[in-house]
Image (spheres, helix red, strand yellow):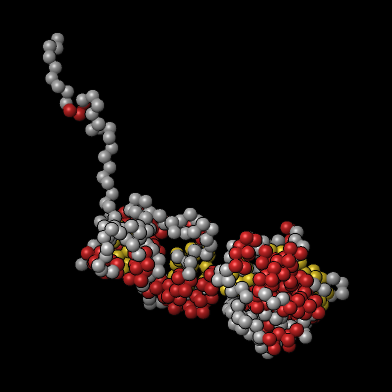
């Protein structure tokens, strides 16, 4: 489930169908990917909502809370290991973005997948060429039934995606879950369609099963990378352990700026960090520290960071 | 009875523009690190940078010119410096004709990845955010007063 959902979240940096063809041609174009935990949170949240309404165990409710806790932390680790404990660790699972697949694990996993999903996986594996895989994905995208606008709510939205993705699950009487999904980008639509095709009709218990680990669809060959905003958040979170961290993409405010290409996103950010690690350092030192942490982003496209760096004391905490 | 009149004072002569034309002092021109691409450089840009930074009391590296900044952060910095009222120099990093490669060189030289950048008395002070924080407290003025 983790990998599928993570792939579901991989988004094109400019959500338009023309960009998809561009990405087919240039493997080096960066496609931002949101962390798998986010879509897990959506689908498991919704699944857990249903399960709790059916009176299942309280571990499902704890799933929900741990999901929220995990949403903040993410990272492209390749985790193929089975979860050690119950539902909780499931949400901590993330699958490496753009890392090659591991054959043996996939075969192992396939046995536990719902049949429909298995078929889809086999279908994709049967296609030899990456380009054809893309085309197949696009075919799925076109097949996807659009979701009515009233369901494009914040609840259904997958957070952290550069493209907009909505997933709406519905429960039938015999505890089967059907998914509907939509997205504004063709690529994510395709991945959402895979989810809808593969998991609709599965029972709640199947979806929530611990040992459910989907194969890595990153074998499409697309370099899937995290959006800059996410990687900035991740790096600052890890290094500074802040009490407050806000990262906002304000590139749209600087459109038409000298030196900014038309339609460029993720070039200007407002970053607010409140962390204990800043005590006793001068303003320059704090800014330099942040710049050093975000060196990679600054070299690849981001060229302005409006920084507010404070210690908890300074803001009166 | 008036029999003769003298010449009108010069300011009252027909067609005099003394009182109508507004004379605006031209803004101090930006520092250009090289005269242009027709002159080949014998020293690297970094050294030129060093010279400029050390020789001026205050120099501000911005995107655009003093009167036409091309970036909101550069504009902010210039506004603050104008408010402080001190004399400062401006270097346009977007001017590839006169300052080739300066945009990257200044980032490496200061070990600071964004522009604008302010140097006072040869020392790096900071960027737009830092100046923003220093402005209300009057710290900037003290930087200039320090010997």
Residue drawn at x 87%, y 74% as measured from the top left: A174
Q: Pick whichever, A129 or B15, lies toward us.
A: A129
Left or right, B103 with respect to A199, comes to left
Q: Residue furthest right?
A: A174
- Res. A210 visible in picture: no
Looking at the image, which residue sits at the far top?
Answer: B1
The spot of residue A88 in percent (x, y) is 68, 83
Residue B77 lies in quadrant: bottom left
Q: Is A259 or A29 nearer to us in this picture? A: A29
Q: Is residue B86 left or right of residue B101?
A: left
Q: Residue at x 23, y 33 (%)?
A: B18
Above or below — where is A252 with respect to A73?
above
B83 or A261, which lies in front? Answer: A261
Q: x%, y% of residue A183? A: 69, 63
Is any part of residue A236 visible from this angle? yes
Q: Above or below — where is A145 with respect to A317?
A: above
Q: Position of residue A309 (x, y in %)?
A: 44, 70
Disc tally is 0
Location of the N terminus of chain A by quadrant is: bottom right
| Res A221 quadrant in image | bottom right
The residue positioned 71% from the left and 85% from the top of the image is: A106
Q: Is residue A159 left or right of residue B48?
A: right
**B57 left or right of A249 in image:** left
Which is more toward the observer, A88 or A6? A6
| Quarter of image, res A34 | bottom right
**Which residue is depicted at the point 30% across and 65% down?**
B119
Q: Position of residue B103 (x, y in %)?
A: 37, 64
């Amino acid at each position: 489930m983790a990998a599928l959902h993570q792939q579901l979240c991989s988004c094109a940096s400019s959500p338009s169908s023309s960009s998809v063809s561009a990405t087919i041609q240039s493997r080096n174009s960066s496609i931002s990917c949101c962390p798998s935990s986010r879509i897990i949170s959506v689908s498991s949240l919704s699944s857990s909502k249903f399960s709790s309404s059916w009176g299942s165990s309280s571990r499902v409710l704890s799933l929900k809370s741990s999901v929220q806790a995990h949403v903040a932390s993410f990272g492209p680790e390749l985790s193929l290991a089975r979860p050690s404990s119950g539902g909780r660790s499931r949400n901590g699972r993330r699958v490496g973005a753009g890392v090659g697949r591991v054959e043996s694990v996939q075969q192992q996993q396939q046995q536990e997948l719902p049949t429909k999903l298995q078929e889809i996986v086999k279908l994709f594996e049967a296609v030899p060429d990456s380009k054809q895989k893309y085309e197949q994905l696009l075919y799925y995208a076109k097949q996807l039934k659009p979701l009515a606008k009233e369901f494009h709510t914040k609840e259904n939205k997958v957070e952290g995606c550069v493209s907009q993705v909505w997933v709406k699950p519905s429960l039938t009487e015999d505890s089967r879950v059907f998914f509907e999904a939509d997205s504004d980008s063709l690529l994510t639509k395709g991945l959402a369609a895979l989810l809808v095709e593969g998991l609709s009709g599965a029972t709640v218990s199947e979806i929530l099963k611990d040992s459910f680990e989907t194969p890595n669809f990153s074998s499409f060959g697309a370099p899937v990378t995290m959006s800059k905003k996410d990687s900035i958040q991740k790096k600052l979170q890890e290094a500074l352990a802040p009490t407050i961290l806000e990262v906002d993409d304000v590139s749209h405010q600087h459109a038409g700026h000298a030196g900014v290409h038309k339609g460029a996103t993720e070039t200007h950010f407002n970053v607010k960090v409140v962390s204990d690690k800043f005590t006793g350092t001068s303003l320059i030192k704090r800014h330099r520290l942040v710049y050093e942490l975000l060196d990679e982003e600054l070299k690849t496209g981001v060229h302005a960071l409006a920084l507010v760096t404070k210690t908890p004391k300074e803001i009166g905490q | 009875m008036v029999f003769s009149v003298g010449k009108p004072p010069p300011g009252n002569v027909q067609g005099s523009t003394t009182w109508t034309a507004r004379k605006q002092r031209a803004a101090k021109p930006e520092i250009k690190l090289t005269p242009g691409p027709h002159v080949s450089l014998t020293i690297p840009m970094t050294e030129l940078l060093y010279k400029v930074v050390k020789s001026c009391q205050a120099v501000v590296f911005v995107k655009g010119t003093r009167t036409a900044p091309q970036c909101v952060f550069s504009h902010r910095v210039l506004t603050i410096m104008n408010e402080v009222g001190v004399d400062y120099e401006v270097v346009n990093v977007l001017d590839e004709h006169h300052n080739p490669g300066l945009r990257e060189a200044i980032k490496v030289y200061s070990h600071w990845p964004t522009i604008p950048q302010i140097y006072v008395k040869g020392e790096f002070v900071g960027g737009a955010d830092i100046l923003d924080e220093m402005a209300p407290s009057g710290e900037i003025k003290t930087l200039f007063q320090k010997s």
